Image (cartoon, grey):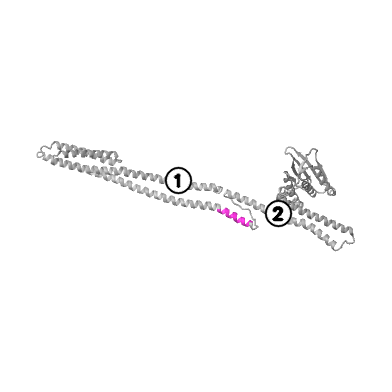
Amino acid sequence: MLKLTIFNRLIISYFLIILLVGMSGTHIIMYLNDLNRLIDSIVMHDSRIIKLAEEALDDLYSLAAAEAKYFISKDPDYYRQYKQTNTDLAKKVNELEMMADTDIKRGLLTDIKKTQVRYDVLFDERVSLMPDRKELEPSYQVYEIERARIFRDTDQKLRNFVRVSTEDRNSKLQKSKEVSVRVTDIINISGIFSIFLVVLISLINTRSINLPIKQLGEKAKEVAGGSFGEPLKISSPPEIRELADTFNMMCERLKELDQMKIDYISHLSHELRTPLTVIKEASCMLQEGVFSKVPEKQEELFVVINSECERLILSINRILDLSQMEAGKMFFSFQQADLRPIIERNIRKLSPLTRKKNMDVTLEFPQGIPLLRMDKEKIEEVVENLLSNALKFTPEGGKISVSARDNKENRTVEISVSDNGRGIPENGLMQVFDKFKRVDDRRGAIRGTGLGLAIARHIINAHGGHIWVKSKVGEGSTFTFSLPVS
């Protein structure tokens, strides 16, 4: 059950319980049917046979009584009574023979029928010789002896028949009691086993669900306390395993955010501390009158203070701009504009630095590039950032190329900034656009200050475009952004 979902576990559990109840119910129904057949047999068959046999026994005694009365009184009514009783007895014997369900009963009834016929023949013979009883006194005695023997024989067989039928009925009653006890046992055993199975399945399912949830809760408390530790490993059930995997991803993301917070504080401290330190030192020098007699040096200190203030304001504005972009509150002033002047202006702005590093900067901007709907200031910020990064991480004597391409298939214009610098490690390509993320190329260079590319991505996304990078360590990098053609 390790890989079964919670839903499937519950379905299988319920199915096992239903199967158990169904099997026990089937056995109970079978035994109840047997019990019903036994009761029907006792009530409709055995009781009827015993009753008929007892009535036949009564008829036998009535037959003997009518016979005796007839021979004493010669009254024809007793003769008719004898014949009627004999007919009733024969009918009962025939009915019993039809209802007999064992060889013993059928054998007894066959003998009873023979003795009855012999008894009736003997009676008729005696009646035909009745006119002179005195002369026939010896024969009468013989008749009496034979009649008594037949009577006893018939009486004994009828009583045996009643006994055998009663034993069969009692046997069925005993069997019905055994069936009843068996049904009771099945109900009790199946009930106890069902309860045990329900409790066992409930414990297994509860433990398999509760234990991972408990582990997840304990891990959540650790994360809430700031301790990320090892990833949570839960193999089953699949739903909770997926939840644990998602939770682990969340922990990894929280760990990254925590590291980003540290980087942010470090970055912010660095961005603010450097200009503030310069401003403080320059202000102290002016206050102490170090260059009071050298106006040119004082003017340089004022320029430095002004420059560092602008740098400080720029850093703070970039942080504020990024916050506004992430909150979706940044205002963009869209208008139709040409990209070429923006790119050329930024190349000229950086020309003193490129000449100082003896770098070659080329621009490929073919004719026919359409105007684009954009915020010129924001797009200029993106271009400036990409060119500054290329300049910063390209060695002296390197090459930077800027190219534009009209992608008619996607109805976009693509701007690429390439350098032949040290490149970006493969594991850093997905992180280079994250805020406060600076990627180390393992040879001392740090790609990005942590805000420029993150701001660039927000700006390009706000224009409905995309920005991406291709790079290989030792060969350089190419940053490309696309803007839709209006």
Q: Check disc 1: other Cα within 10 Å, few if <14, some if 14-19, many if 20+.
A: few
Question: Mark 2 = which residue?
Answer: 260
Camera sees residue 28: yes
Residue at x 38%, y 44% (from the top left corner): 33
| Residue reaching furthest to the right | 293
Q: Nearer the viewer, residue 434 or 444?
A: 434
| Mark 2 burial class by Cα count in 10 Å: few <14, some 14-19, many 20+ | some
Mark-to-mark CA distance, 2 and 1: 62 Å
Write down the residue under mark 1.
22
Residue 216 magenta-drawn? yes
Write the residue at 63% across / 57% down: 222
Residue 34 position within the rendered picture, expressed as x and y whole percent measured from the top left: 37, 44
The answer to whether residue 110 is magenta is no
Quarter of the rendering occupied by the C terminus: top right
Looking at the picture, which amino acid does disc 2 mark?
Met
What amino acid is found at the position of numbered circle 1 in the picture? Gly
Q: Earlier in the sequence, mark 2 or mark 1?
A: 1
Residue 144 visible in rendering: no
Which disc number belongs to residue 375? none
- Please, is residue 342 above or below residue 224 in the view? above
Q: Position of residue 146 (x, y in %)?
A: 17, 41
Query: What's drawn in magenta, residue-wise?
Result: 210-223
Tag 2's secondary structure? helix
Tell me residue 64's x, y (percent): 18, 42
Residue 110 left/right relative to 298? left
Q: Position of residue 94 (x, y in %)?
A: 26, 38
Looking at the rendering, which quadrant does residue 123 occupy?
top left
